[in-house]
Amino acid sequence: MAMLFTDRFFPKGFEEFIGNVEIVEKTCNWAKAWEKGKKQKPLLFHGPPGVGKTCLALLTAKVFDWSVFELNASNLRNKENVERLAGAAMQTSSFSGKPRLVLLDEVDGLQSSDRGGAAAISKILKVSQNPVILTANDIYAKQSLAVFRGSCDLQQFKKINYLSIAKRLREICEIEHIDFEEDAVKELARACSGDFRSALLDLQTLSFTGKISGDSLKSLGFRARQENIFKVVEKIFKANTVSEAREARFKSDISGEMLMNWIEENIPRHFKEKKDIGNAFEQLSRADIFEGRIMRRQHYGFKRYSSELMTSGVALSRSRDYGGWIQYQFPGLLRKLSSNKGERNLKKALAKKIGSQLHSSTRAFISNDLFYFKMVFPKNPEKYAAQFDLNENEIAFLLGSKPTTKKVQKIFEGSREIRKKEFANKRRLQPLEAEIQDKGDSAQEEHKPVTEDSPNQTRLF
């Protein structure tokens, strides 16, 4: 089988790499610093597919003669795998003594079920003794990727200009002796939308049919491409027809729920007039109603209504077009939920401990009773902490303080002493309680009423 063009025409050096010249230069300097023994921050390459993110990482290792330890999203499933596979590679050099490149490819492919994977990677990045490069298509689509954005040097790849792609395609055609039409090659480069990898694969496919011409291009059909979430949101808000908004939605690879959160967050940023903002939120609320019906009735046919209302409905609810550049933001609700996750878990733990003794459910205690308990707790904190077996974090939360303060530590130690005394008293009382119980049982036997079936009963009749 013929070698794929993506492998056959892999760049031999940085000068053959197409597009994103500034990132190439920065990566080269980054690698030179590692060669001199100067530790650098990990690089995070992000951008649309096919622009050379993984290619540049592998090219860097090839130019500097580094070995490569590569993991992708299918390997980065959980904390144990990451620490076992990537940990060793990050802490040791290769047999030649040169740095080893650790390539974590497609980190945005981590799913919510991959528990601990993202956190484990972030932890390892901070202590790595080898150069690390991560790649991702969209680092803003998931909140879990925030840990990477903070610990890496972000390098955003842009789509490659179609003229640069066309020039390289012509060179390949000449090398491979492929007959082609100039306009057809330009159209092929333009149709790939900056995805050089797909352009190479399309060129190789067409080369088997003979000449690269306008007629042969028609056999390729339409190639659906995913777009950055910021571009998707912008196209939805600026859509003038239902089909435009629908096309933008189809180009997004995030879930419908996440897309709705993005739209909700950015309605006030895009629309300027209060009337348009109100109309947009009205359409979004109707979409949310259908989402609720889907969950209650398990009827996913309503999805066609919620999807159209939150995109086309919002876009076409405006009274005029809004131009200019707008800085769209990641959904604040998700950011807030992520930041106070620890506090919510703490509340649940409190509710389970206290609610079980108050015969109250976890949800009811958090909603109705927690507020009043926080008011009562400071009046006798040691007693309450002992009664419900609270730890330092729970005591600090109820007092609005920190677990390390002297006050919290004193209350915690006092509660431990109370529980020890209660436990000791209970053990001393257990023999006495057993003796009383035995005597009580004997007394009940002596005063037990004589029944008709009793063998000692004198029958008169």
Image: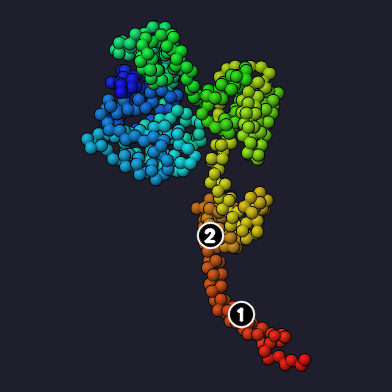
Q: Is residue 409 left or right of residue 3?
A: right
Q: Residues within 10 Å of mark 2 (few under 14, many from 20)?
A: many
The one of 337 and 260 positioned closer to us in this rendering: 260
At x 60% / y 19%, what residue is drawn? 243
User: Of the numbered discs in the image, which one, if any, rests on residue 412?
Assistant: 2
Q: Position of residue 284 (x, y in %)?
A: 65, 29
Tell me which residue sits at (36%, 14%) in the image.
Answer: 207
Q: Is residue 14 visible?
A: no
Residue 450 visible: yes
Classify the position of the N terminus by image quarter.
Answer: top left
> Which residue is at the far top?
182
> Are the residues tagged 1 and 2 within 8 Å (C-beta)?
no
What amino acid type is highlighted by mark number 1?
Answer: Gln
Helix, strand or loop at mark 2: helix
What's the residue type where badge 2 is placed?
A: Phe
Position of residue 446 relative to residue 430, above or below, is below
- Residue 444 at x, y percent in the picture: 66, 83
Please identify the quarter of the rendering in which residue 156 is found: top left
Q: Residue at position x 33%, y 22% from top?
A: 4
Q: In the depicted view, which residue is nearer to us: 415 or 18?
A: 18
Q: Distance from label 1 to label 2 (Cα)?
A: 36 Å
Along the polypeptide, which appears first: circle 1 or circle 2? 2
Q: Nearer the viewer, mark 1 or mark 2?
A: 1
Q: Nearer the viewer, residue 114 or 380?
A: 114
Q: Position of residue 150 (x, y in %)?
A: 45, 34
In the picture, residue 415 is in which quadrant?
A: bottom right
Q: Which residue is mark 1?
A: 437
Outermost residue toward the right in this view: 461
Residue 250: x, y in percent? 54, 25
Look at the picture and state if 63 lies above or below 116: above
